[in-house]
Image (tube, rainbow, N blue to C red):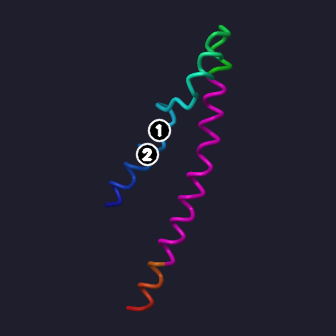
Amino acid sequence: MKLKILFLFLLFLMMPEFAEAQCAMCRAVLESEGSQASAKGINDGILYLMIFPYILIGGIAYFIYRSFKNKKDTSS
């Protein structure tokens, strides 16, 4: 079970490498400039901003899970 969780964690950790976060309009404007560095920078910035809500939700879910597990262990 722990191996499966580790595999899923590593898979989700590598997901930003495959993600394209720009909308179609932003991509068209940035790619028409000729410099791909600014388009890549904007895309990376969007991906980094998307990480924080997932970290917060994951942290809250972990604490809820831990509190339910502690209640279950103390009631047994």
Camera-side residue: 41 or 27? 27
Q: Amino acid at mark 1?
A: Met
Majority secondary structure of magenta residues: helix
Q: Residue furthest bottom?
A: 75
Inter-mark Cα distance, 2 to 1:
6 Å
Residue 10: mark in rendering? 2
Give above or below for 22 relative to 50. Answer: above
Q: Residue at x 49, y 74 (%)?
A: 66
Q: Callout 2 environment at 10 Å: few (<14), some (14 to 19), or many (20+)? A: few
Residue 34 location, x and y as percent? 65, 8
Q: Residue at x 48, y 43 (%)?
A: 13
Query: The N terminus lies in which quarter of the figure?
Result: bottom left
Name the image quarter holding residue 29.
Answer: top right
Left or right for 73, reference 58: left
Q: Amino acid at mark 2?
A: Leu
User: Which residue has dot 1 on it?
Assistant: 14
Region of the chain picked out in magenta, as a range: 40-67
CB contact under 8 Å: marks 2 and 1: yes
Name the image quarter holding residue 73.
Answer: bottom left
Q: Residue furthest front?
A: 25
Camera-side residue: 18 or 5? 18
Give above or below for 8 relative to 21. Answer: below
Residue 32: mark in rendering? none
Q: Residue furthest top?
A: 34
User: Magenta span has 26?
Assistant: no
Residue 76 location, x and y as percent? 38, 91
Q: Callout 1 environment at 10 Å: few (<14), some (14 to 19), or many (20+)? A: few
Disc 1 is placed on an element classified as: helix
Left or right for 73, reference 63: left
